[in-house]
Amino acid sequence: MRTPIFLKNTYGDWAVSLFISAVGVLACMGTLMLRGRPLSLFSFNKGAALTAMWLVILAIALGSLCRTTKFSKPLRLRRPLGILAAVLMSAHAILSLFYLDDRYGWGYFGKNWEALLYGLAALIGFLLLWLTSYDFMFRRMGWTAWKKLHNVVYVLLALSLLHFCHLGKPLCWLDWLEGVQTQSCVRDGFIPPLSLILFLGLVLVAVVRLLEPILRQPKWVDDREDADG
């Protein structure tokens, strides 16, 4: 059984993925600054969480792109993007739990325990995907079991969505759409909440995945054929 293309990565693949990750974090921090939050460890924490989710969305979108076009090379970025997403999620969890300030403390987590539960469940799942994103684990598990495990990413995305929904993010979206200025949610009316943009990205990826059977190239060689050689 050959190693599939998505588990073969060059230094260039990692360099591109690191660049995308860094740009994502900096873009989120810059947007938060425009919305009234100064650059700080807090803004990095938020940027890490949002960028991690965008990396997962991008990895899924690359798979759809390759299956609906004749381009297969972008598949090589899926693994490093996924691993870097797990790293950023871990950083977000550590900073959220141990970097406590006036806004966030154990009382806050006690009040939002459901959000904490969903977030930790998603993190554990993404870490499991990270640990199995290596050739030796792929060969040991076999294609069928490995593929079933990594399809859990859609469940993990749903858990992540529940995580920020239980933190009251949809209420912030409504405030922004209605033009209501609140201290905690809307700092600058013309810039939408980053969590809203992330949610729209999730919806877009879901729509593309649903349409994929219609758009799929008839001559597409799927991952299993590539893995089996």
Image: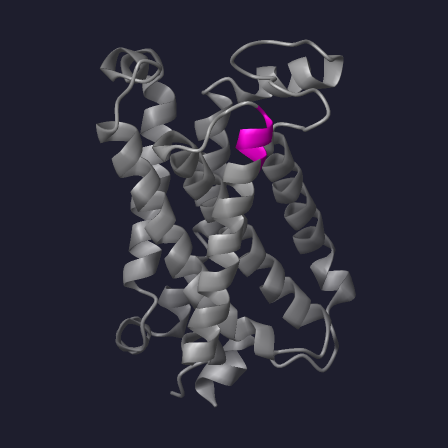
Q: Is residue 142 above or below residue 110?
A: below
Quarter occupied by the N terminus: bottom left
Looking at this view, is 40 or 111 the one in front? 40
Q: Image check: 128 left or right of 76?
A: left
At which x and y percent is residue 86? Answer: 36, 52
Residue at figure coordinates x 45%, y 71% from the top left: 15
Looking at this view, is 74 or 33 the one in front? 33
Specify the quadrant of the image occupied by residue 46: top left
Q: Determine if the magenta segment contains residue 32.
A: yes
Looking at this view, is 132 or 188 the one in front? 188
Residue at figure coordinates x 28%, y 13% from the top left: 110
Q: Is residue 102 above or below residue 99?
A: above
Chief secondary structure of the magenta portion: helix
At which x and y percent is residue 22? Answer: 47, 54
At which x and y percent is residue 148? Answer: 42, 60
Q: Determine if the magenta segment contains residue 188.
A: no
Residue 9 visible in the displayed image: no
Q: Which residues are magenta?
A: 31-35
Residue at figure coordinates x 33%, y 73% from the top left: 138
Residue 33 visible in the displayed image: yes
